[in-house]
Image (cartoon, rainbow, N blue to C red):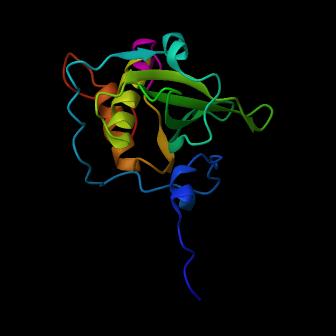
Amino acid sequence: MHAPIKTIHDELAMTRSPRIPMLPGELPQQRLTLVKDLPERPADWSVKTDSFAEDVAPIAMPRSARYIGQVEWAWSPMNMRIDAYYLSMCSHHRFWVLWAKGYDDNWGEWMAPSAVAAATRCGLGSDAAARLLLLAYWQTQCEQEVDRFHWVNEEELLSAGALTEIANAAWRDPDDGETGDGP
C-alpha cells in the first residue's frame, strides 16, 4: 500500500473540529518537552485583543484557519472551561487573527469561534504569530484574574510544550518570577 499523497490543498485546509480527550492516554505529553524560546516581538507589532480584535477580523473564521491546539481548565466536576485556538489572516492578509472556540458542556457542542486577538503581520510566520498572539491573549486573561489552564488537551500547530511555555510566560508573577498554578 502506498501512503496517501498530500496536496497543497491538504496543507491549507487545516481547520478541523477539536476532539476532547476522554482517557488520560489520549492527552499529549504534558512535561519534559524541549521548546524553543518565544519569538522576538517586532518593534512595530501592534496587538488588539477581545472586542478590538473583532474590528479587523473577518465576520466568520475562515475555513483555511490553522488549528493551534486545545487547553482545559478543570476547577471542579461541575465547573470547567475548554478552549480550542485557531490562527488565520484577515481577508486583506494584513493581520494575523487568533480565534477561540469554547465548548458548551451543557449542550455538548462547540460554540461559534470568536476573534480574541489580532496583530499586524510584520513579516512573522504562522508559528511565531501563534505564539505571540496566544501570549497577548493569555496575558489579558491573567489580568482578568483567570487562572492558568490545567492541561493541554490537543496539540497541532504548537506542541503541548510550546503551549505550556507560553502559559508560563503569560501567568508569570511579576514580583518573584514564579508562574501560577498548573503543570
For the image shown, how many numbered marks are present on the structure? 0
- In the image, farthest residue toward the right: 107
Q: Would you say 46 lies left or right of 141 here?
A: left
Q: Would you say 64 lies left or right of 156 here?
A: right
Q: Give the range drawn in magenta.
A: 141-147
Vertical placement of residue 20 versus 100, above or below: below
Vertical placement of residue 23 versus 171, above or below: below
Considering the image in quadrants, where does the N terminus appear? bottom right
Considering the image in quadrants, where does the C terminus appear? top left
Q: Position of residue 44 (x, y in %)?
A: 24, 18
Q: Which residue is drawn at 56% across and 58% down?
A: 10
Q: Residue at x 54, y 11 (%)?
A: 51
Quarter location, residue 49: top left
Vertical placement of residue 168 versus 139, above or below: below
Q: Which residue is drawn at 50% across and 27% down?
A: 90
Vertical placement of residue 55 versus 125, above or below: above
Q: Which residue is nearer to you in this view: 172 or 11?
A: 11
Q: Position of residue 40 (x, y in %)?
A: 20, 32
- In the image, farthest residue toward the bottom: 1
Find out whether residue 166 is within the magenta segment: no
Q: Where is residue 75 in the image (x, y as percent from the top left)?
A: 56, 30
Q: Position of residue 112 (x, y in %)?
A: 69, 29
Q: Which residue is drawn at 40% across and 47% down?
A: 158
Find out whether residue 146 is within the magenta segment: yes
